[in-house]
Image: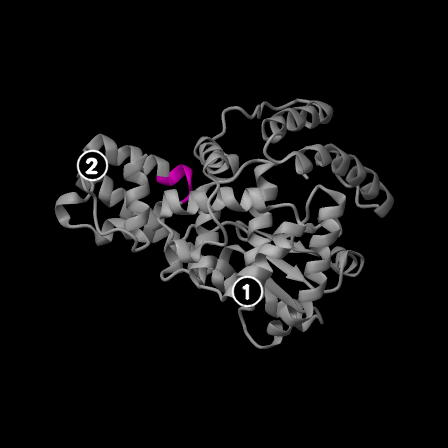
Amino acid sequence: MVLFFDLLQIALGNKENFSNTPTGEQWQFIYDLSVRQALIGIAFLGIKKLPEAQRPPKHLLLKWFATTEKIKEINAEMNAKSRSVTKRFLEDGFRSLILKGQGIASLYPEGDFRMSGDIDVWVEGGRKIVSKYLRGIKKDCKVVYHHADFIQIGYTDIEVHFTPTWMNNYFSNNRLQRFFNEIKEKEFAKATESDFPTPSLKFNRIYLLVHIYRHLFSEGIGLRQLMDYYYVLAQGFSDEEREHCISVLKDLGMLRFTGAVMFVLQKAFGMRDELLLLAPNEKEGEFLLKEILIAGNFGQYDERINRSEGRSEWSLFINGIRRNSRFLWSYPSEVLWSPIFKIWHYIMRLKWNYFDSNKYLSKI
């Protein structure tokens, strides 16, 4: 594990080389872990910086190179699709911003090495107006509280967000939505100034951390999401900006989680002290890092999750609650509010006439 973290830190420029050259078996472990954490391209950047004597065996190096070249090709396609999507919305009278993903990749020194996912776009107008517009284009598009599964362009899913994200706790969520409402006019102003509009660092310092937090309680998170946050903080901030960010996170009840993330950013990526929002929380950070390494990218490798088909939605709902129980002592608010939010969401989708699928209770 130490060698894997060393390679990531070499890629980020926080370390020069390995103190001990990995064996062929260790290189295979590093490669497999890079795949699990969706950091294969970033890890290859580290390899490029290594002296030849410390690089992987030739067969693995060629495989790594080929995979990375494919990642770069996909990123070029994703950037083109992102521009096309925001242009289409603007032509139809809706300002929009590209959230996380391709937007955050622009903060990386070499963003085309970042493994991409789907395209998330925040569209101005609110759920009622935007969902009506979307269903005029695609009648059966699936709508939930914060977004709609809109269309596919090739193999790329396009998620349209009415609000960037949410929290389970009713009161914390109200404060979060207030933050988005206060900042949105300034953020959406960029939609007419750029062919690839993305949110500000002020926005992302809050949004990305909440996004990571929320996914911890659903399928899980991986190091790729933490690296995205690394690059948000790596852009720097003033003392005033730090104080504002901490104040918002405190209102959201997220300081303990923030401390855990700061620990992971230092442990895995070697982040400098002056770029941390607050002091690392070692106890919570070790727990979070363990979860990240077990679950992999968005929990895809978490063997504790029962993915067998044919299970009832009630069974999945209970399984989700049972899964979240291990976070109860660390983050009781979100864990205890989770089933309440899910039930409320079920009822409201019926009321909004968005109930077009029986399979969502366990996924929201």
Where residue 143 sits: x, y (%)?
73, 48
Dot 2 corresponds to which residue?
22
Of residues 182 and 241, the one nearer the viewer is: 241
Magenta-colored segment: predominant secondary structure: helix
Relative vertical location of residue 345 with respect to residue 301 in this rendering, above or below: below
Which residue, as the protein is rendered here, is positioned at the far right? 351
User: Could you tell me which secondary element the residue under label 1 belongs to?
Assistant: helix
Residue at the image position 71 percent from the left and 27 percent from the top: 313
Q: Which label sits on residue 291?
A: none
Looking at the picture, which amino acid does disc 1 mark? Glu
Relative vertical location of residue 142 with respect to residue 87 in this rendering, above or below: above
Magenta highlight on residue 215:
no
Residue at the image position 28 percent from the left and 43 percent from the top: 6
User: Could you tell me which secondary element the residue under label 2 belongs to?
Assistant: loop
Q: Residues within 10 Å of mark 2 (few under 14, many from 20)?
A: some
Look at the image and tell me whether residue 54 can be seen: yes
For the residues labelled 1 and 2, the Cα–Cα distance comes to: 41 Å
Where residue 305 sits: x, y (%)?
56, 26
Where residue 226 sits: x, y (%)?
47, 47
Going from N to C along the chain, the mark reached first, 1 or 2, is: 2
Q: Which label sits on residue 241?
A: 1
Magenta residues span 34-38
